């Protein structure tokens, strides 16, 4: 079976995006893992299917690189909108795309060439000062579960994010559903730098949208920064901008969403030969 796909990057978070509005494609977890595998597949942090919605402009079906359905992915949502815009999916709200993901409504718009602003759900389930693996952790759900750990000045680049993040991520006695883990450093009253170990990818990624939101709102909530508009520098070197009101609501995530390339793949059935 031949499938057209598009590879997109959201500030370094990369995704395989497929137009499945005719609902002809059903992928197994094994097939998704194969496609997302670095070196032997296309390579991506996740896979997104754009599908028809009964209520909105489209539905986003998101799968992590491990092949399993994922919770909300902020950069994936922005890439989904840019992809929909690029293939001519009409927006019904005067240029604002309204789509569904995990039974939630999201609004987003292409604000400039290769720039997308996504309106996020309100953060919830705040938990402060949890001692985990020798770290003082803070937790918030921004559509995905996130742990936030503040790093001393100058230490962020030296952290072993893979080992330290993996240890915290798998403490299911504290985080029953698992957690993404963000290490961050305060740069200025309106600026932070983060590194993220992502659940489902099981590795450090170059960016994480819901992690950027979690890190920004938690930094503001704890008085580490003073601005409700926060520049978030991610591992790729790109910058995401997170904005919210003083009550940590009306959250938006803005950043680059770029088409890297388009291609065609031959989808093999499990255990079949090329």
Image (cartoon, helix red, strand yellow):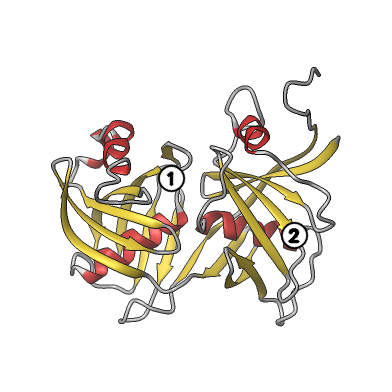
Q: Is residue 34 above or below residue 259?
A: above
Observer-side mark, 1 or 2, equals 2
The secondary element bearing badge 1 is classed as loop
Q: Residue at x 30, y 39 (%)?
A: 165
Q: What residue sits right under mark 1 in the picture? A: 237
Q: How many marks?
A: 2
Query: Could you say which is closer to the camera, residue 29 or residue 239?
Result: 29
The x and y percentages for residue 246 are: 30, 81
Q: Is residue 67 above or below residue 126?
A: above
How many other residues sit within 10 Å of disc 1, few (<14), some (14-19) or many (≥20)? few
For marks 1 and 2, give the CA distance: 32 Å
Q: Dividing the picture into quarters, in which one does residue 84 lie?
A: bottom right
Q: What residue sits right under mark 2 in the picture? A: 51
**Quadrant, the C terminus:** top right
Q: Residue at x 72, y 76 (%)?
A: 55
The secondary element bearing badge 2 is classed as strand
């Amino acid at each position: 079976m031949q499938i057209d796909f598009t590879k997109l990057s959201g500030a370094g978070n990369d995704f395989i995006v497929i137009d499945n509005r005719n609902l002809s494609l059903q992928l197994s977890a094994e097939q998704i893992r194969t496609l997302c595998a670095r070196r032997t597949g296309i390579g991506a942090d996740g896979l997104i299917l754009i599908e028809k919605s009964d209520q909105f402009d489209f539905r986003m079906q998101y799968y992590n690189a491990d092949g399993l359905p994922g919770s909300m992915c902020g950069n994936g949502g922005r890439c989904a909108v840019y992809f929909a815009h690029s293939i001519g999916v009409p927006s019904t709200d005067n240029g604002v795309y309204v789509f569904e993901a995990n039974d939630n409504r999201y609004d987003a718009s292409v604000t400039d060439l290769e720039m997308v602003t996504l309106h996020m759900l309100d953060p919830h389930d705040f938990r402060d000062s949890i001692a985990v693996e020798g770290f003082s952790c803070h937790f918030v759900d921004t559509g995905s579960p996130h742990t936030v750990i503040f790093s001393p000045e100058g230490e962020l680049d030296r952290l072993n994010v893979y080992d330290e993040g993996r240890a915290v991520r798998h403490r299911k006695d504290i985080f029953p559903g698992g957690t993404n883990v963000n290490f961050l450093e305060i740069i200025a009253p309106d600026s932070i730098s983060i590194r993220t170990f992502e659940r489902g990818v099981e590795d450090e990624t170059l960016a994480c949208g819901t992690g950027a939101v979690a890190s920004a709102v938690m930094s503001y909530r704890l008085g580490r920064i003073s601005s409700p508009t926060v520049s978030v520098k991610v591992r790729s070197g790109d910058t995401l901008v997170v904005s919210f009101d003083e009550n940590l609501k009306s959250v938006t995530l803005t950043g680059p969403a770029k088409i890297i390339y388009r291609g065609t793949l031959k989808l093999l059935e499990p255990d079949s030969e090329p």
